[in-house]
Amino acid sequence: MAQKCPKCGAAFSVNVAQPPSDASSPTTGMPTRMVFAVVGISLLGGIGIGIGIGAVIFSDATPVENQVAQQPNIPPAVTSTESPLEEPLPCESIETSKSETAETPSELIAPADNDEPPTREAVVSTTEVVKPTAGRIALESIPEATPNKLDASMSGFLKSHCQDCHSGESPEGGLSLDSEAVAFDDPEVRRRWSYLFDRVAQGEMPPESAEAPTANDKETFLQSLGGVLTRADLDQREVILRRVNRNEYTNSVNDMFGIEADVSRVLLNDSTENGFDNIGSKLSVSSEQLQTYVDAADIVLDQVFGPAQAPRTLNRTINLATSKRTTVTATSGERILSDGVVLFSGSKYLPIYEGAVHYAGNFRVRAKVRAEQSATPIFLHIKGGITGQISGHSVDFFDVPPGKVTTLEFVDRARERSDTLGFALIGGNPSWSVDAANYTGAGVFIGDITVEGSIDTWTESRKRLLGNIDPSKGTIADIESVLRQVARRAFRRSVADTEIAPYVSLAKASLDDGGGFEKSLRLALKGILCAPEFLYLDEPIAADLSEINGDRLNDVLASRLSYFLWSSIPDEEILSLAEQDKLADPAVLKSQLARMLADPKAERFIENFAGQWLRVRDIDFTVPDRVIYPEFNQLLRRSMIDETYAFFREILNKNLSVQNFVDSDFLMLNQPLAEFYGIDGVKGLKIRRVPRPENSLRGGVMTQASVLKVSADGTRTSPVLRGVWIMNHLFGKPSPPPRSSVDIVQPDIRGASTIREQLAKHRADASCSRCHNKIDPPGFASESFDVIGAERDWYRVRKGGKYIKKKLHPHSSRNVLYKQGPDVDASGSTPDGRQFTNVREYKRLLLTNETAMPASMASLLMSYSLGRELGFSDRQEIEQIVAQTRASNFGLKSIIEAVVLSKAFRSP
């Protein structure tokens, strides 16, 4: 449910289920500073802080509109009775969802003859990718207020060119355009009319069979409708008080206190919109969520203050050959030597039980290793946690060279008392049991293993917080000093005396009650970590930030900039510039942008933005069939992820054109991935830039293994699903779902028929071919790659194909179990009839539209940076960004800079 903030009137999203009421909750109209005092009393009295926070959030709130709680495919009914577009636009009467619909952009390559607009259920992406349509909307075309009816130019155009088909009792497609009354203040109505705007602008409506409007009539209609849609979007846009998401909360508290607290295990997962988890309208709040912030604050403060006594230190050396707690035998895959063991099996982790720690903390581990019976380096995987259990985690992968023994060193954080380590050979014999005494294949020697720790400085975080304050002599003045420093960083701005007073009062009440200095300080800090000023990013409600006073403008920009690029609180330099009213200066913004992108914390932007845009975060959503794809392993998985992030990083750091995301003349590879791609000359685990081989199908993100894996299931590929995925996620062009009466086409994994043969029959239905003309081309082009992103000429099948004589492993006696199915055909044609024979040619066709990828990237970055979906009024801003960055050949860093300097970034 949307609520209005009692402080500024901005909207924020909460779950329909309200938090419980309490006698200590503030009354309606109570000033915010009084609300905080109530929070303190609730804490002191032992009442759950969630109730107190709920009181702060809900004190003055009044419902604005109901939202469907986290159910994107169960949309609310459209209730407007004024709009002639009240019925769903597609020919199929599929109910649609306003929270899941985007204003559909113009075509990526060339428009097909398709009169079917998408349904609300159809469109997953809510951020439209904006392309220039019929030119910019003239300022004089934008009315002063949102009208509730069509003007004469729009009515005349519809009557002359649309109402022959779209009027009467049975209008074509259920779309009636014979009423002048239109509720443009309804967001769903605006989305539908935005779609109509695009269809006319692209020449898809009226259809070719109808009389075409003159260029002047068409432009007049588009200017009138575009002006109305722009005004309505501006008038109806609400400022969303965006809650920090789970990732941002974790980064914020760790940067604030200089710790490494893992609070993600207690915070709830965040909902996503357009693939991003920082969209304010989706970041709702419930009583359960409020309680998690209390739990998270405890975890944070436990680590800040540390244990009451210094933890014990551990310095132990273990050798698996002599260990009494680790079972190694010649028949289980390990060869026992006098100074260590040699691991040959690639199907097991060799645990070090005697290395188990007895308390949490960071531990430094050194292990003597060498490649055995191998002339080249081999790869070793170190796993931490309770090895083999769900809580286990990957520490790292290492190159182990042959010859002399070398020492590998790493630091791992033990989170449980029983945490231990495990060693696994990557590429070893796949059998669990190997006759190690007689085995001639490669292995890894593991000698002495030294575990040292905890290497954490026990009092470091405490000293950072307290400075020179002696807790045994601390006063309320000392507590206030600490609280001011913490609140300034937590609230991301200067804090007034009236704002800090409730927390000081809370600590004083605890001191007076005999709570002691540390306990009282901790209680007040807990209140700050659960305060709305920390949990929500404060946003202005002025139409433009330039209309508000300088300090507010700078405060807002400080948070927007830091959460955009670092997913965390501003650092001292940004805060100081904001406090000096300097941050709003474009030159200062550009300077800070360059500094922030060069900071190691910018890696968060790469992983959060690229990881969600390309869905790399979802790489574990499916597990490849081990029979059909036995070569898939954890090192390959890790290399896939590293490739995509390294590719994005290379384009960002060197300000390369975003067209490289479509196709590039370079790849980012390490040895395992290069071997997987069939590319020679790349050695070692380090990802590096490699020239794309001539005639290679690789290049861009469409052909990266991570993208190919997340756009398929674990057994088979589907050109339909991949086509939809590519058009939606890469270019922001969502496709409508098939009618409920249409059977879903799935690949025949028995190999009896190809997906192309099945789709040919499916596309015989004209209503189906309209969409498949658009989504099938990228899907067919991607058929050259299998479920895990390997290049292929034929499909792998379990049954019905030819037997393959290929060993599971060079030293294995067994052949692969999959069989050779039908040949792959990756050819196709674009909606305008241009032919391609493979994905390389298809990517070249995509690049003929030079603004598609820049506009898509600008839209994605704008939405991500603002934490909201874009609307019709954002279109001209996107067009301006594309125009401004043309001189840099649409460099990624240039587009980011243009987004930061845009009016939208400085506006609600």
Image: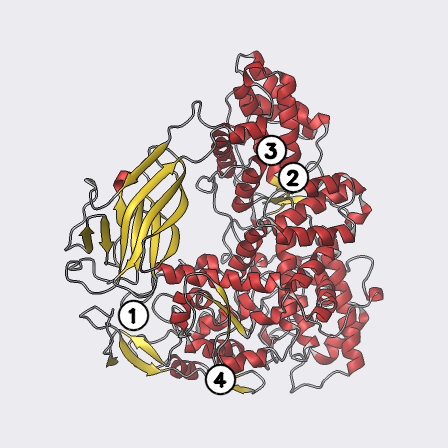
Q: Is residue 414 left or right of residue 849?
A: left
- Mark nearest the camera among 4 and 1 is 1
Tell which tag, 3 or 2, sits nearer the viewer.
Answer: 3
Task: For marks 1 and 3, give the CA distance.
Answer: 52 Å
Please tell me whether mark 2 sits on a helix, a strand or a loop. loop
Name the N-terminal-most of marks 4 and 1.
1
Q: Which mark is residue 628?
A: 1
Pair 1/3: label in front: 1
Q: Earlier in the sequence, mark 1 or mark 2?
A: 2
Q: Amino acid at mark 1?
A: Ile
N-term mark: 3 or 2:
2
Circle 1 sits in a helix, a strand or a loop, which is it?
Answer: loop
Name, please, the residue furthest toward the right.
140
* CA–CA distance in space, label 4 to label 1: 27 Å
Residue identified by numbered label 2:
62
Per the rendering, the mark at residue 828 is 4
The amino acid type, in three-letter code, at marker 3 is Ala
Image vertical order of residue 377 relative to residue 793, above or below: above
